[in-house]
């Protein structure tokens, strides 16, 4: 038990070395790849999937999964965009989007915590339900043409960095403090590693479980706002497949599906590796359809590999 | 409790759904429409039969929709680009489906991955390969033999319906009359006990996931026949419908309990729901939402019937 976090933390330097290695290789092949602008661009691209991956890490730490994140991106973006088009001032529009994400995340959480549905069943159902909802909001049409104030999160910048990176960093900080410095973090990990022991030691298991799904919904809503702002359009088809990129990052970062073990820093590095790979494949003109295959193979390979090393470490 | 639900519960749900739909719109029980429902639910039914095997072992196959597309495209390309006669092209398509199933099984049995994660990976890989092979555009120009089974009828009975009945019968015989049936259920009931009893877990895992891959592949080939072309984007969301049909048919999502007869009933429930909503002019995107809710509802019903929510066993799970 004392060594609980050792496997994942000893993995971090290796992950970091992989990341640096890939960047160096790509930079050696194409010097423009390691120009500062391109690196900032890669960070900006990472922030979308990265935000969701942070929420997903919390969910997976409790032994769950959230397959509905992509659909929640679309619903919350449309909720915010609908409010913006109705002339509501922008902080309230953002609030509407975040509330939509939190609410649907709460439904996920209650289904898992109270009705004790298997998480992938609850969130697979929500994936369909929320996607349909996103189409219903506008009858299938995208909403476009927003004020610059509404779009600010997606297109603005501060101190030379695009705002999405700041949002990503800010959310990371909040979640990191919650997970690593607050008693809440231990509760999350204990729900994942042994729900019964957690129950016995007085942890509010259903409450903590519901909370991580709410946070994952909020992360999805943030992505919805960033995306809508960036492309000046809220699409009902937004976010399709985001769950997969996020899970890939989380898994690559060493968070275990059996719950309890994993780290946010690992997730961030995992997401960065996936984005760098993707952008490298773009640069090398790899067919975009191949990226999906690569993601699937990477998740499977990482899980099989970590499964083996995990076993070796345990016994 | 579970036994009764399994035998009569799903039949009761089917009758209630049909009666409710008929009250709203008499056309639902028009013989012509009923035949239509039967024909249209066969593709789902074929997938659901394979899914039943997987779920009985306590597993899940989220890749069925992608495998449908993969098999359809592999078969279609073999038929058009390679010019192979349709039986060979079909065999290649079915082979691709079984390969995908074998990959899922290998990840689960040897890679020790959770079934839903393993099949989620295969879902992405199969869809990606399908899109790579076609560059995203449909494959048309199929030979008449290739498409025949997908759209033609013998007398009044669509060939797809016959294939579905044949498949369901074979599956029923395998589960009810051969030793494989008890093995499959034992695996779902208590994997540890099954292993101690000497039932080969990896062998069984390969058998059920390859069965599911075969069925999804068959569904994809029938679909390609019906549409006269293989669509790389087809089958999205099929896993949701297939799991719903299986669970509505009384097969427990947690393995061990269930039957093919139930899955046929569950398929008809999904078919009538689909048909009824469409007859009422409900927009397709509203149907997506309703199906998501039905999916979760079916699982809640399954849990409730198993006494999951009763006080006595409440801390058992």
Image (cartoon, coloured by chain):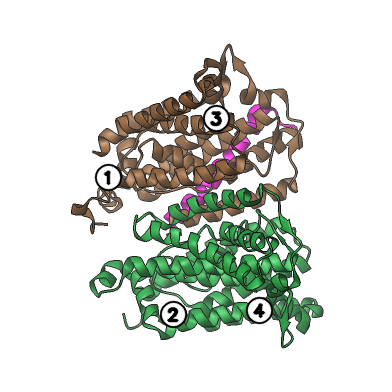
Chain colours: A green, B brown
Q: For the residues carrying marks 3 and 1, which lies nearer the camera in this image?
A: 3
What's the chain of the residue with tag 1? B
Give the crowd class for mark 3: few <14, some 14-19, many >=20 residues within 10 Å: many
For the point 65% across and 66% down, the residue is A88
Quadrant for the C terminus of chain B, please.
bottom left
The circle on residue A179 is 2
Between the C-alphas of marks 1 and 4, the distance is 48 Å
Classify residue B152 as left or right of residue A231: left
Q: For the residues carrying marks 3 and 2, which lies nearer the camera in this image?
A: 3
Q: How many marks?
A: 4
What's the chain of the residue with tag 2? A
The circle on residue B306 is 1
- What is the secondary structure assignment of the residue under circle 1? loop
The circle on residue A165 is 4
- What is the secondary structure assignment of the residue under circle 3? helix
The circle on residue B136 is none
Between the C-alphas of marks 4 and 3, the distance is 47 Å
Residue nearest the viewer, comparing B208 with B124 = B124
Residue nearest the viewer, comparing B275 with A240 = B275
Are labels 3 and 2 on one chain?
no
Pinpoint residue B151: horizontal percent, then vertical percent. Answer: 64, 23
């Amino acid at each position: 038990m004392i060594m609980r976090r050792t496997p994942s933390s000893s993995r971090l330097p290796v992950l970091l070395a992989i990341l640096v290695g890939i960047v160096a290789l790509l930079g050696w092949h194409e010097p423009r790849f390691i120009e500062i602008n391109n690196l900032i661009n890669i960070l900006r691209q990472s922030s979308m999937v990265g935000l969701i991956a942070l929420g997903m890490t919390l969910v997976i730490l409790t032994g769950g999964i959230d397959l509905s994140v992509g659909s929640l991106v679309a619903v919350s973006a449309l909720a915010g965009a609908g409010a913006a088009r109705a002339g509501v001032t922008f902080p309230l529009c953002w609030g509407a989007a975040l509330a939509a994400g939190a609410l649907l995340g709460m439904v996920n959480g209650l289904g898992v915590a109270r009705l004790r549905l298997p998480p992938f069943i609850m969130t697979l159902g929500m994936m369909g339900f929320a996607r349909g909802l996103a189409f219903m909001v506008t009858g299938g049409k995208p909403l476009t043409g927003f004020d610059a104030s509404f779009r600010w999160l997606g297109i603005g910048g501060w101190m030379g960095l695009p705002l999405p990176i700041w949002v990503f960093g800010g959310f990371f900080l909040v979640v990191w403090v919650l997970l690593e410095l607050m008693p809440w973090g231990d509760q999350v990990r204990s729900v994942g590693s042994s729900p019964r022991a957690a129950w016995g030691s007085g942890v509010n298991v259903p409450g903590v479980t519901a909370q991580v799904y709410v946070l994952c919904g909020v992360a999805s809503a943030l992505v919805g706002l960033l995306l809508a702002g960036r492309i000046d359009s809220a699409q009902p088809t937004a976010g399709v497949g985001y769950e997969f990129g996020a899970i890939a990052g989380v898994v690559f970062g060493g968070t275990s599906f059996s719950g309890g073990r994993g780290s946010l820093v690992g997730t961030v590095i995992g997401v960065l590796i996936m984005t760098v790979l993707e952008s490298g494949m773009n640069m090398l003109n790899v067919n975009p359809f191949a990226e999906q295959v690569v993601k699937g193979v990477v998740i499977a390979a990482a899980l099989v590999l970590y499964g083996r090393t995990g076993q070796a470490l345990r016994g | 409790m579970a036994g009764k639900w399994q035998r009569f519960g799903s039949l009761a749900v089917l009758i209630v759904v049909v009666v409710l739909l008929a009250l709203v719109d008499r056309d639902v029980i028009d013989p012509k429409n009923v035949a239509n429902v039967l024909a249209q639910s066969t593709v789902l039914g074929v997938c659901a039969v394979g899914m039943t095997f997987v779920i009985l072992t306590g597993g899940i196959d989220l890749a069925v929709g992608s495998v449908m597309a993969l098999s359809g495209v592999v078969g279609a390309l073999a038929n058009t680009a390679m010019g192979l006669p349709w039986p060979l092209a079909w065999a290649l398509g079915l082979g691709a489906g079984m390969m995908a199933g074998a990959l899922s099984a290998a990840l689960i049995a040897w890679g020790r991955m959770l079934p839903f994660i393993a099949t989620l990976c295969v879902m992405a890989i199969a869809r990606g390969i399908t899109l790579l092979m076609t560059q995203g555009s449909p494959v048309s120009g199929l030979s008449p033999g290739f498409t025949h089974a997908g759209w033609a009828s013998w007398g009044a009975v669509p060939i797809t319906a016959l294939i579905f009945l044949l498949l369901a019968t074979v599956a029923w015989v395998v589960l009810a009359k051969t030793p494989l049936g008890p093995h499959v259920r034992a695996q779902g009931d208590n994997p540890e006990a099954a292993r101690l009893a000497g039932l080969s877990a990896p062998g069984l895992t390969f058998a059920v996931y390859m069965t599911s891959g075969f069925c999804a592949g068959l569904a994809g080939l029938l679909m390609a026949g019906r549409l006269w072309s293989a669509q790389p984007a087809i089958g999205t969301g099929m896993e949701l419908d297939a799991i719903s049909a299986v669970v509505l048919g009384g097969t427990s999502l947690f393995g061990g309990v269930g039957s093919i007869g139930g899955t046929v009933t569950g398929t008809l429930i999904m078919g009538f729901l689909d048909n009824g909503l469409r007859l009422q002019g409900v927009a397709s995107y509203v149907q997506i939402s309703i199906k998501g809710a039905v999916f979760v509802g079916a699982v809640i019903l399954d849990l409730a019937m198993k006494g999951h929510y009763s006080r006595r066993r409440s801390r058992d799970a």
